[in-house]
Image (tube, grey):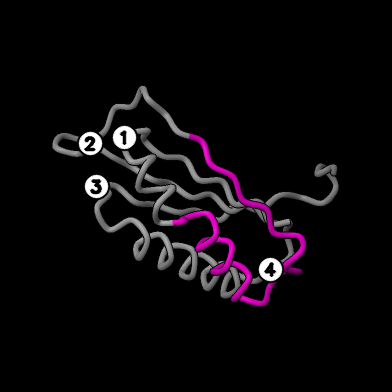
């Protein structure tokens, strides 16, 4: 834990790969010192069928799922780190967003 999931429009897949977005996000999460570095996992999935607001042709959204128990300040700092890494790696993308999601330990299995 945590799980970093990157969703993106497939038209930016070459930029995702060349920017090394997953390693950058992994490093950003690790740098918060909120998690054991050996527990951080990252993956991505592209979508060919998308509908975006008028004029937009690309998106990247990052969801970081974490177990509950972190303070709002910790979650906010985590999202600031994630979104900062995303903006740095993917400035050419029209729509960038990120979200921190809490999971309960009672319903999570690994």
Q: Is disc 1 in contact with disc 2, using a CB cutoff of under 8 Å?
A: yes
What is the crowding at mark 1: few (fewer than 14 residues within 10 Å), some, or many (at least 20)?
A: some
First reached walking from the N terminus: tag 4 or tag 3: 4
Q: Residue furthest top?
A: 49
What is the crowding at mark 2: few (fewer than 14 residues within 10 Å), some, or many (at least 20)?
A: some
Q: Locate residue 14: give its quadrant.
A: top left
Distance between the Cα atoms at labels 1 and 2?
A: 8 Å
Q: How many marks?
A: 4
Residue range of the region highlighted in magenta in the rendering: 20-45
> In front of the other: label 4 or label 3?
3
Distance between the Cα atoms at labels 4 and 1?
A: 35 Å
Q: Give the structural element (helix, strand or loop) at label 3.
A: loop
Q: Is disc 3 in contact with disc 2, using a CB cutoff of under 8 Å?
A: yes
**Quarter holding the C terminus?**
top right
Q: Residue at x 49, y 70 (%)?
A: 81
Relative placement, left or right, of 22 versus 69 is: left
First reached walking from the N terminus: tag 4 or tag 1: 1
Distance between the Cα atoms at labels 3 and 2?
A: 7 Å
Q: Residue at x 27, y 49 (%)?
A: 93
Relative placement, left or right, of 33 versus 19 is: right
Q: Residue furthest front?
A: 18
Q: Which mark is residue 94?
A: 3
Q: Is disc 2 in contact with disc 4, using a CB cutoff of under 8 Å?
A: no
């Amino acid at each position: 834990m945590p799980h970093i999931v990157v969703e993106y429009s497939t038209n930016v897949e070459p930029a995702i790969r060349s920017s090394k977005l997953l390693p950058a996000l992994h490093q950003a999460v690790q740098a918060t010192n909120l998690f054991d570095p050996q527990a951080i996992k990252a993956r991505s999935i592209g979508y060919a069928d998308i509908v975006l607001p008028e004029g937009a042709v690309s998106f990247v959204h990052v969801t970081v799922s974490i177990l509950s128990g972190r303070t709002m300040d910790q979650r906010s700092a985590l999202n600031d780190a994630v979104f900062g890494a995303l903006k740095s790696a993917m400035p050419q993308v029209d729509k960038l967003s990120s979200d921190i999601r809490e999971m309960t330990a009672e319903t999570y299995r690994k």
